[in-house]
Structure formats: structure tokens, C-alpha cells
Image (cartoon, grey):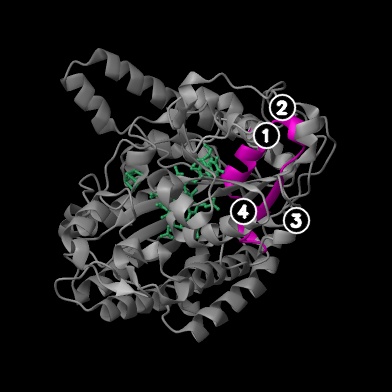
């Protein structure tokens, strides 16, 4: 047998004998160096792999370190420890893997970073095996092999078709810890932005889940008391009008049909979301192309998709060229596009990147101006970071090559291995600005956008005084969790930000929870608006 095991060749089975199965526990760990006690969004992979864990092994022990650190003493010899890593938390993942292996556990890594650097997880993280790609189908097989002593070094999970995505097991959620549930409706993105790895790892062909399975999970989350749900999609608008015109022009009837089906399914999903209780609130990630389509935005509003992260990235044509995002608008056209979302009742979280080659000192203030004029409710201003798997990363790695600067003995082209506190904030040399200038100017834009006065003005987008106060609290939490920790160089400031975030997180969570409705009738068996509640007799008044 070859070293890598591919999911295509194996039927899914859960054949563990009860003796072996009961003797060991399965742990699933989401690593984090910082724990806030309360989490904003449920890390979906934990609950998907939790569902994929064969029942014979009992419920897995789910550990999300953004809530609290793993107690390594809960891991025993013979247990299986699955660790999911993205680039930002890989180093902490390796610490956990090494410690778990030292306790005699079988260590398996997965997630986007392990997919890109499987050998690293073996060398630095104590991995016995690494799963590349989607874990939905291959995970039961890995556990089975581990239990029977036939574990392989590498498993190729591949890109699982949408009809084989495993729905998350929300009964495994620790109660009272998260603000938002997360349900994925589509994986993959047809675009090709230079800073993003999604189109290369998840693919450019959108894999859209069936409407029924998405709705079923949302119903499940609502039963557990979640009325805020993040649609953890790469791009909720996978078919732009330009894609349809292009297929028409090329007389590519097969493609045209595929695109029309995808689009029709989006509308079907939104129609079904619109039938759910009106107190549900959804948030997603979308390209600004959606502003071209009033019917789509109206459907979003009816579906209670009240917010969307829009990748604005740059406000100048040169900046958009830098990131290969030619489908975005710049300048005044951009302001109008973003306003369109708001006019249709969809609030925008604008995502902007600083440190692009074409950026100049004036770009920072210009960006803040656009964000304000466009009426975005929230904004994040991130500094260009070359993430592995991206076009930017490859170009940068090739350019700096062997002569890459080193920090703590580690080349900056492996920046995720540098201890968190020493990690540089800016990597690629900029033609006209020093790294510290970019960092300081970025921080100043956060300070400006999230000043109390400006937040208060923006909070007018909410209907009541209570909602306005909630908006202020959430804005402050968002800022503390994202801005200071990522940008500040001074560790005292980082610690202060973390303390603040911890303090605000608990009261913030109360604003999001609803009363659990365990008896809520299944929306799939009883379709139709509002009928859904009649059976349970429960009130839907939110708790917070
Ligand atoms: C939703 C989302 C968010 C949300 C919610 C995060 C959360 N708590 O879940 C928010 C908006 C908060 C967010 C923030 C960020 N995100 Co994000 N996010 C996503 C997104 C779109 C979906 C994640 C998701 O839920 N997927 C669904 C689950 C089921 O899929 P999955 O996690 O990939 O897991 C599957 C496999 O990877 C595998 N697997 C995963 N773990 C394990 C473990 C084992 C043992 C095994 C066997 C298998 C396995 O099996 C799973 C099931 O198939 C992804 C893109 C993507 N398509 O994944 C980006 C993505 C993960 N984010 C990314 C980034 C960069 C960020 C930020 C740094 C952005 C920023 N600048 O602030 C922050 C970091 C926050 C943090 N500290 O974690 C990058 C990561 C790139 C990288 N190389 O690490 C991605 C890939 C997007 C991109 N543009 O490239 N993100
Ligand atoms: S940044 Fe957004 S639009 Fe661009 S490739 Fe990634 S997911 Fe797609």
C-alpha cells in the first residue's frame, strides 16, 4: 500500500470492536494561545469531526482552547488526539501534539495548515498521521486504523462532494459558551484573489450543500438556544451575473445550466431561511458583486441575513490590481456598491488590507473615509500577511529565498513558527513605507473607526436604545479581540486588550442567546412559516 491513503478507495465504515473502542477516548482540540472564556463563533470543524467520530468510541472530548486551555492530564495512553490547525495557531497545535504524544496518545493533525505542510506536523507536532483536505469522510477510517494498529502516515481526505459533507453534532457543544453557531452552506470560491488560499485548497468549483441539510442544522442550533448563526461560507454569492453572461456568450450550455442551478439553489435556501422564526439572524461572507443584483439582496433581507463580511481589500484601482480583485470597485463606485447592501437591510463588515505595494501614507485615511462614507457597520483593517497556499506567499518566498530574515532563528518565510510575541507584524518589504509606519498607521485607522463617538453615530443603524448600547459593546469587543492583539507590538497593550476582551465577552454573549427550544418541531417535516412554533408552545422571546 502506498504511504498516503486516499479517501476515494475506502468505503466509510465504523468497524471498531467494542473492546478496543471503549478502552480509548477520542479528543478533538482546537488550539489557541489565548483563551477568552467565551467564544464568538463555534469552530465548526470540531463539531463536524465530532459527528464523523464513530459512535462505538463514545462521544469525543471536544476542547476549544479559545475558551480555555487543554488540560493535558485528560489525555491518556492509547487515546486518539485530533488537532485541527490553520496557520495562525499551528505552533500551539504542535505544542499540544508533542505533549499528547509524550503521554502515549496517537496524534493526528488536520486542517488547512496541516494540508499545506503535512511534514511539519510530523517533525514539530508529534504527529503519527496527517489528514490532508476534508476530514468528513476519512476521519472514521483514521480512527479505525488507529484502533487496529494500522495507522498510515498520510491520509488524503480530498475535496468531499457537498452531498457527503457531514452535518455538525451540536449536542456536543459546551453550553453557554458561544455567541454564534456556524453552518457552512457552500465551500470553494470561483475567484482567485492573490492573498487568499481558499480557491486553491477548497477549489474554484462551489460545492453547495442541499438546502434540507443546512436548514436541519439551523433548526438544531435554534433548539440549543442559538438564534445568531454565521454561514461559514467562502463566498455566499458564487454565481455573478457576469459569469452567466460569459457562459451565454461562449454558448457553453452545460456551464450555463450548472450556474443557473447553483443560483436557483441559493434562492431556494434563502426562501427556506425566510420561513424560519423572524428572530433568527444570519451573517455571511460575500463578494461585493452581489450589489449588482437587487433580487438577491432582497432575498437576503427576507432570509434574515442581516450582515455580511465583504472583502473590500483596497479602495484604489492600483490596490485592487495588487490583490487580483478586478471584480471590485474603487473610489466613489465602491461607496455606492457598499451602500447598496445597507439599503437592502444587509449590514456590512468591510474587510480592508493595508501594506499593499501600491499603498501610500495617504491610503490609510482615504480608506477610513471610504469605510465611513459607505456606511459600513463594522470594519477590519488587516495588514497584508503572506499566508501559505496563496499566490502572494509563493511570490514572496521565491523572492526572499534563502536570504530571508530570521527571527528567533526562524526564517520569516516560516513566520507561524516564530513565538507569538516575537512575530513581525509586517513581512513583505514595502516600496515606500517602513514596517513600523504601516503598523502604526493601521493602528491609527482602527483607533479612528472604533472611537466611541464614531461607534455611537454608527449605532443609529439599530432600532432601539438597548440595541444601540449592544452595538457599542460588540464594537468594542470586536476591536479588542482583533485589533490590539494583531497589531500592537507592546506586550502590555496586548495583555490589556486581552483582559478587556475577557471582561466584555460574557455580557456580550448574553445579548446573543435565546432560550433553548429542545421540543421545537422539525422544520423539515412541517414546512411553512411560523407553524414551526405552535407545537413546542415555547415563547421565542430572546433571553438577553
Ligand atoms: C468562517 C471562517 C472564519 C470565521 C470563524 C472562525 C471560527 N471560529 O470558526 C472568522 C470570521 C472569525 C474567521 C477569522 C479568521 N480567519 Co477564517 N475562515 C473561515 C472559513 C470561511 C470557514 C471555516 C469553517 O468553519 N469551515 C468549515 C469547516 C468544517 O472546515 P475546516 O475548518 O476546513 O475543517 C475541515 C478540514 O480542514 C478538516 N479538518 C480540520 N481540522 C481537522 C482536524 C483533524 C484531526 C482532521 C482529521 C481533519 C480536520 O476536516 C474538516 C471537515 O472537512 C475559512 C475558509 C474555509 N473554507 O475553511 C476561513 C479561513 C480558515 N480563515 C482564514 C483566516 C486567515 C482567518 C483570519 C486570520 C482572518 C483575519 N485576518 O483576521 C482570522 C483568524 C481567526 C482565528 N484566530 O482563528 C484562512 C486561513 C488561512 C491559513 N492558511 O491559515 C481561511 C482558510 C480563509 C482564507 N482566506 O484563506 N474565519
Ligand atoms: S478572498 Fe474571497 S473572493 Fe477572493 S478567492 Fe478568497 S474567498 Fe474568494
Q: Which residue is mark 2?
A: 16
Q: Which residue is mark 4?
A: 101
Residue 250 in the figure: left or right of residue 94:
left
What number is the disc on residue 147?
A: 1
Q: Nearer the viewer, residue 539 or 499?
A: 499
Residue positioned 67% across, 29% down in the render: 529
Q: Is residue 518 visible?
A: yes
Q: Is residue 343 visible?
A: no
**Mark 3 falls on what kind of element?**
helix
**Mark 4 falls on what kind of element?**
helix
Question: At which x and y percent is residue 350?
Answer: 39, 58
Q: Are marks 1 and 2 in contact (CB under 8 Å)?
A: yes
Q: Are marks 3 and 2 in contact (CB under 8 Å)?
A: no
Magenta span includes 207? no
Dot 3 alpha-carbon crowd within 10 angstroms: few under 14, some 14 to 19, many 20 or more? few
Q: Nearer the viewer, mark 3 or mark 1?
A: 1
**Mark 2 falls on what kind of element?**
loop
Establish if 412 lies above or below 531.
below
C-alpha span from label 3 to label 2: 22 Å
Locate the C terminus and report the quarter of the image it occupies.
Answer: bottom right
Establish if 57 lies above or below 321.
above
Establish if 393 lies above or below 255.
below
Q: Which residues are magenta?
A: 39-68
Amino acid at each position: 500500500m502506498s504511504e498516503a491513503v486516499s479517501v476515494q478507495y475506502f468505503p466509510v465504515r465504523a468497524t471498531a470492536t467494542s473492546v478496543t473502542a471503549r478502552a480509548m477516548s477520542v479528543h478533538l482540540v482546537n488550539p489557541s494561545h489565548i483563551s477568552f472564556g467565551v467564544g464568538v463563533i463555534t469552530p465548526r470543524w470540531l463539531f463536524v469531526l465530532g459527528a464523523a467520530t464513530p459512535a462505538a468510541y463514545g462521544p469525543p472530548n471536544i476542547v476549544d482552547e479559545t475558551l480555555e486551555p487543554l488540560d493535558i492530564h485528560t489525555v491518556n495512553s492509547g487515546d486518539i488526539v485530533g488537532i485541527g490547525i490553520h496557520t495562525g495557531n499551528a505552533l500551539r497545535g504542535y505544542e499540544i501534539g508533542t505533549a499528547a504524544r509524550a503521554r502515549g496518545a496517537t496524534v493526528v493533525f488536520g486542517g488547512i495548515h496541516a494540508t499545506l505542510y503535512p511534514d511539519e506536523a510530523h517533525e514539530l507536532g508529534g504527529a503519527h498521521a496527517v489528514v490532508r483536505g476534508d476530514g468528513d469522510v476519512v476521519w472514521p477510517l483514521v480512527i479505525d486504523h488507529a484502533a487496529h494498529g494500522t495507522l498510515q502516515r498520510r491520509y488524503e481526505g480530498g475535496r468531499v462532494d457537498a452531498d457527503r459533507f457531514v452535518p455538525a453534532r451540536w449536542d456536543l457543544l459546551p453550553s453557554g459558551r458561544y455567541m454564534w453557531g456556524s453552518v457552512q452552506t457552500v465551500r470553494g470560491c470561483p475567484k482567485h484573489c492573490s492573498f487568499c488560499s481558499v480557491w486553491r485548497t477548497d477549489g474554484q468549483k462551489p460545492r453547495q450543500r442541499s438546502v434540507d441539510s443546512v436548514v436541519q442544522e439551523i433548526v438544531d442550533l435554534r433548539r440549543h438556544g442559538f438564534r445568531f448563526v454565521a454561514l461559514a461560507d467562502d463566498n455566499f454569492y458564487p454565481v455573478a451575473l457576469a459569469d452567466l453572461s460569459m457562459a451565454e456568450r461562449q454558448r457553453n450550455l452545460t456551464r450555463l445550466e450548472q450556474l443557473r442551478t447553483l443560483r436557483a439553489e441559493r434562492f431556494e435556501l434563502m426562501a427556506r431561511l425566510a420561513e424560519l422564526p423572524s428572530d433568527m439572524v444570519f451573517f455571511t461572507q460575500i463578494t461585493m458583486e452581489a450589489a449588482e443584483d437587487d433580487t438577491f439582496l432582497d432575498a437576503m433581507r427576507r432570509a434574515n441575513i442581516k450582515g455580511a463580511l465583504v472583502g473590500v481589500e483596497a479602495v484604489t484601482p492600483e490596490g485592487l490590481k495588487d490583490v487580483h480583485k478586478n471584480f471590485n470597485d474603487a473610489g466613489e463606485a465602491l461607496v455606492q456598491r457598499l451602500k447598496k447592501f445597507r439599503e437592502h437591510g444587509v449590514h456590512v463588515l468591510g474587510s480592508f488590507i493595508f501594506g499593499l505595494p501600491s499603498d501610500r501614507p495617504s491610503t490609510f485615511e482615504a480608506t477610513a473615509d471610504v469605510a465611513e462614507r459607505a456606511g459600513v457597520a463594522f470594519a477590519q483593517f488587516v495588514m497584508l500577511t503572506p499566508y501559505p497556499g496563496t499566490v502572494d506567499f509563493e511570490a514572496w518566498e521565491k523572492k526572499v529565498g534563502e536570504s530571508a530574515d530570521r527571527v528567533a532563528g526562524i526564517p520569516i518565510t516560516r513566520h507561524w513558527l516564530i513565538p507569538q510575541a516575537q512575530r513581525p507584524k509586517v513581512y513583505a518589504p514595502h516600496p515606500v513605507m517602513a514596517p513600523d509606519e504601516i503598523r502604526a498607521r493601521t493602528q491609527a485607522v482602527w483607533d479612528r473607526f472604533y472611537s466611541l463617538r464614531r461607534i455611537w453615530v454608527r449605532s443609529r443603524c439599530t432600532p432601539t436604545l438597548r440595541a444601540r448600547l449592544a452595538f457599542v459593546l460588540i464594537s468594542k469587543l470586536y476591536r479588542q479581540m482583533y485589533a490590539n492583539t494583531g497589531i500592537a507590538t507592546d506586550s502590555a497593550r496586548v495583555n490589556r486588550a486581552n483582559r478587556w476582551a475577557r471582561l466584555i465577552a460574557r455580557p456580550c454573549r448574553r445579548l446573543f442567546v435565546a432560550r433553548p427550544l429542545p421540543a421545537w418541531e422539525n422544520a423539515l417535516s412541517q414546512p411553512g412559516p411560523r407553524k414551526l412554533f405552535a407545537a413546542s408552545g415555547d415563547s421565542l422571546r430572546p433571553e438577553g
